[in-house]
Amino acid sequence: MTRRGWVLFAAMSVLWGVPYLLIKVAVDDGVSPFVVVAGRTLLGALLLLPFALRGGQFRALRGHVPPLLLFAAIEMAGPWLFLTHAESQLSSSLAALLIAMTPLAAAVMVTTLGHERLEGRRLVGLAVGVVGVAALVGIDIGSVEPLAVVETVATAIGYAAGPVIISRRLRDVPAMAVITASLLVTGLLYLPFAVVEGSGGVPGDAIAAIAGLGVVCTAVAFVVFFRLIAEVGPARAPVFTYVNPAVALVLGVVLLDEPFTLGIALGFPLVILGSVLSTSRGRGPVPEAAPAVVVAAAVLRDGALLAARRSAPPELAGRWELPGGKVEPGEHEADALVRELGEELGVVVRVSEQVGGDRPLPGGRVLRVWTAELLDGEPTPLQDHDELRWLPAGEWAQVPWLDADLPAVRELGQRRAARSGSGW
């Protein structure tokens, strides 16, 4: 895993290790799980809403409502209610132990779906991690309420499925729109129940705990989580749950007077070792660094293709290209296109599919072209461009395209010509 991946991993270990403490504080004060979940989701959504509204990212959700609702149900609505209710009967440490099953469930899912192959080293790491968590917590599961255990296991399965849904069904939708919309859906779903359950008032400590859940453990954490998925993939992303029990246990010992056992000293090193092994790949040649990616959008409207004429640098002036820009580190290509066209053209687009393969650019970069549908706005000229033009069907070949853009334009034109029986 890269250095950036380890930084994100460490951040998530803390951000989603703290909620066990905050949830426990709230439920021990007698606050309903509906109040806790509605409060944290609506607060998180309000904090993220300005970012999601920037550039009209919500419009990119059109056509993705079913997978969005599925993600909201599996990653938030179900797990957070289950976990909060379970912690009214479980210690925060045991809840964290059961949630540590998430990487195992994720590994089984991505293997079944054919996304990745589990190597022996990673299987050993998963097993070591589970043993470490068991030693770390040292609690007899058989002595607790069975329903609470079932609820927490269901939460772990939901956490494992969430990144898979993002990777398979929502990868072309801006992450901020997915996060914010899912929080809103969950919060509004539980708001009526929260109003009824919380009508008797909420203690001050519980209010502070819910605020921490909404700001730190929801708004901030989900932004980091999506970055982690983009960096390491859906199978490795949930492995930080191995470290979460250590965070939860330390907080429990210091703030909730939970016992410090020998299992802590024995289990914590195993947790770290299991995390390292399960997120690593087998030995082999060191791969070359991935090239920097520039993305461009073939924006179509009523059969016309949007083209931009370069005005700089001098050697490219007068030639035409598809609009786009650079992909930032950890950013998905579809997110980059939505962001670039929003910032530079003032339009909202929905990204569809990649056209052709990589095309080399100067400086070791590569160009990748995606088709996109214009959802809102009228494009205006970019910096370093002096004209934008909608090229009608049949006239795409009548402007001098840049060498890197031409193959994608030609492929799209040939597809259209094959359907219509005319030239491109």
Image (tube, rainbow, N blue to C red):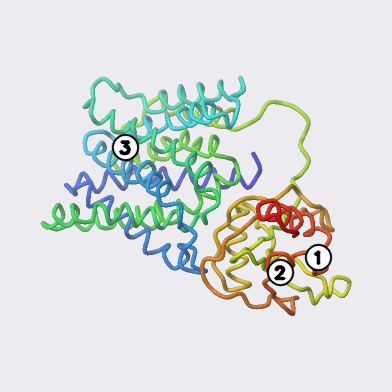
Name the residue furthest left: 200
Q: How busy is the neighbourhood of tag 3: few (under 14 within 10 Å), some, or many (20 plus)? A: many
- Select label 3 or label 2 by which is in front: 2
Q: Quadrant of residue 148?
A: top left
Q: Is residue 200 left or right of residue 97?
A: left
Taking 290 as reference, is 361 above or below it? below
Instruction: Report the front residue among 207 and 85.
Output: 85
Q: Which amino acid type is marked by label 1? A: Trp
Instruction: Report the front residue among 357 and 43.
Output: 357
Circle 1/circle 2 CB separation < 8 Å: yes
Q: CA distance from mark 3 to mark 1?
A: 61 Å
Would you name the residue on which mark 3 appears? 92
Would you name the residue on which mark 2 appears? 307
- Ranked by sequence position, the earlier of labels 1 and 2 is 2
Percent of width and height locating residue 310: 78, 73
User: Which quadrant, please, contains the N terminus?
Assistant: top right
Q: Which amino acid type is marked by label 3? A: Ser
Name the residue furthest right: 315
Q: Residue at x 79, y 52 (%)?
A: 359
